[in-house]
Amino acid sequence: MTDATTPAPVPPPGPGAPRADCLADSAGGITFDIVVVDTAEPVLVLRRRGGAGPADEARLPLTPAGEGHMRAVLPSTVELAEGRWDVYLGERPVEPGIRDLRALIDRVPDEEGRVNVHLPYPTADGRLAVRSWVRGPHAEAGGLTFGEGTCTVDGMLYGAELGPGAVAEARLGERVHQVPAEGGQGGFAFTLAYDPLAEPRPVDGQRLWELWLRPGPHAEPVRISRILDDVWDRKNVFVYPRHQGEGYTAAPCYTSDNDLCVRVTR
Amino acid sequence: MHISFLLHNAYGIGGTIRTTFNLARALAERHDVEIVSVFRHRDEPTLGAPAGVTMKHLVDLRKNSPTYDGGHPDYTKPARVFPRGDGRWKQYSRLTDARIAAHLKSLQADVVVGTRPGLNVHIARQARRGPVRVGQEHLTLDSHGYRLRREIGHRYALLDAITTVTEADARSYRGKLKLPGVRVDAVPNSVPAPTVEPADGAAKWVVAAGRLTPVKRYDLLVEAFAKVVAARPDWRLRIYGAGDATGNERNALRALIEQRGLHNHVFLMGTVNPLEPEWVKGSIAAVTSRLESFGMTIVEAMRCGLPVVSTDCPHGPGEIIEDGVDGRLVPVGDVDAIADALLGLIQDDDLRRRTGRAALAASERFDPVRIAERHEALFAELVARGGNGRSRGRVRDALHRTRGGVLDAVYAARYKAADVLRKGKPA
């Protein structure tokens, strides 16, 4: 699992860098535990990568927690804009320690409206960051099953209800390919044939079709992702069978942002 | 006591490094402990330097370091002292021969501990008189080739003690080699108590962790899990780890997962360090190896409160797990038995939780403090015996060294002859 985005423009943590253990709760809160703090300003700072506004920084006060530990809490009620938030102690990058994320496994969100995910993870260059997703409504992909040249996606829809005329959309730039979606009791399901995604022929290079769910004819489309567990980048972990069509190969895949796609290649 | 460990590379990742760090850290509570790493290729140990332990190195392979040794002319000349039969021979050189010799000849310590056969041979041949010499076997005698076993059988006579990680291997050393006066003790590897809360047995996940190499037989686990999923599709499996120099089963396992239609149930997670927070995401651990020198992951999982289903393979699992009490032992290579044992724990929530609690309690015997006490007692006894009281007398040493000199020449001639034969063979 790698951090595919551009690294932040600061050096990675060196020897003696502060190290934080993280404990995630199922509601989206995180407790950070730092072993030794020799800083004048005991504040844990979260900065959104690529952001520079006041909303792109969250400051969490550190309080003594006994045995030389300092503790900061990111409450589940704090909404971090979607993205990657690097963690600093003052201006120093922080190393990831033990990340106890068991509460995030197979999570069923209970919050009304938007789904908030705060997932602490180690970046490729060895720093601690928090991946944040803010989705309302949210379409969570579940199991994928396969037929002859087709893929069926099952999932759960949060913050919206699937109505008559619901469709799933595969999108590639301006092109939109729709298939009917059905559901009930918060779930959704649709079957996508690969052949139409391989049109027009020939398939040159790679076509990465994004999958969206439109709960009703007039509803806004919802990006289909998988964010309700502890896997911050499932691109190389959730791997699906490839279909060999005439003149093309197709398979569902996740992006490094955990969005579900269908990749069509020659 | 002043205790000096000699380690291949303290800056990498591996079971020997981890267990040496655990032991050194625990001993450092009461003793003066150093780890001397033959190689150093990075500034900080990947696994984190053990607290209170002095770290030294003999050959610097950090390219940006002012003391970089990679350009030394002797660095590319093949080693003569480090035995060829040791799998790491190619990394050793005339430079390591000399550096290790200089270190061992000047070593002011009460105990010097080698951590692999090649280094144990160095200690037997080159340590000055004085320190107690202990050779650790982290694999098993049987896992070594004929050439290395022969050399061990001869050289280890100059050690004071050999420690193995299982009783089974200690029996091999006592029975298959003639090493009169050399004490052979089994002391298992230690695993510290995890810093995370133990698993509560509720998560419907099975967890496995280890290198994705053929010896681990993860193909059997995937096959067994197909049977599990047929009965309990709500349970899933995570396998942590990557391939290494001895093989990479990742693609083969990926293909098998696809073939069995398990892409929604079995996941290859890649390498994750530390593993503790990953174990506790599961409720059962699985080991399907055909060989485990010890079975470190079994103890790690048990210390996290997971019952382990393991093959009863040589050498470790049967000495760690009490079948039916704190885990399950199943025959090697038996897919049905693995699936049945997993399902037995999956179908019975109470049994799973009870077995997990028993695993948590039973695995306390592997705590570094308790394991360190066993090493400490052995070291102290050998040090106390010391000087003239020691089983290895000065005369016997001298005799052995003279014979050793003759044998060195024999070994050298034999290797040379073997090389000529090899080169003469058509490719």
Image (tube, helix red, strand yellow):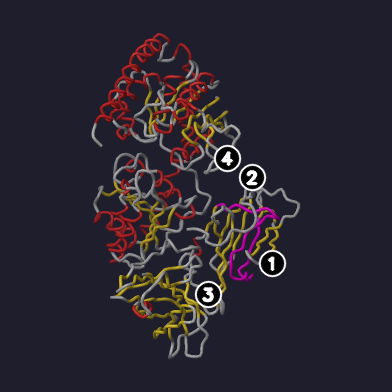
Q: Are marks 1 and 3 on the same chain?
A: yes
In this figure, which residue is indicated by the disc labeled 1? A52
Q: For residue B387, which numbered disc appears in the image?
A: none
Q: Are marks 4 and 2 on the same chain?
A: no
Q: Amino acid at mark 3?
A: Asp
In this figure, which residue is indicated by the disc labeled 3? A110
In this figure, which residue is indicated by the disc labeled 4? B43
For the magenta stretch, what is the residue range? A71-97
For residue B13, side relative to residue A64 (left or right): left
Contact (CB < 8 A) between labels 1 and 3? no
Q: Earlier in the sequence, mark 2 or mark 3?
A: 2
Q: Is residue A79 magenta?
A: yes
Q: Nearer the viewer, mark 4 or mark 3?
A: 4
Query: Residue B216 location in percent, x, y?
Result: 33, 48
Toward which corner of the image does residue A44 lie, by quadrant?
bottom right
Q: Amino acid at mark 1?
A: Ala
B43 over B57 or under it: above or below = below
**Residue shown at the point (54%, 59%) measured from the top left:** A121
Determine whether the residue tagged by mark 3 lies in a helix, strand or loop.
loop
Q: Nearer the viewer, residue A9 or B394?
A: A9
Q: What chain does mark 1 sit on? A: A
In this figure, which residue is indicated by the disc labeled 2? A16
Contact (CB < 8 A) between labels 2 and 3? no
B219 over B144 or under it: above or below = below
Q: CA distance from mark 4 to mark 1?
A: 34 Å
Q: CA distance from mark 1 to mark 3?
A: 32 Å
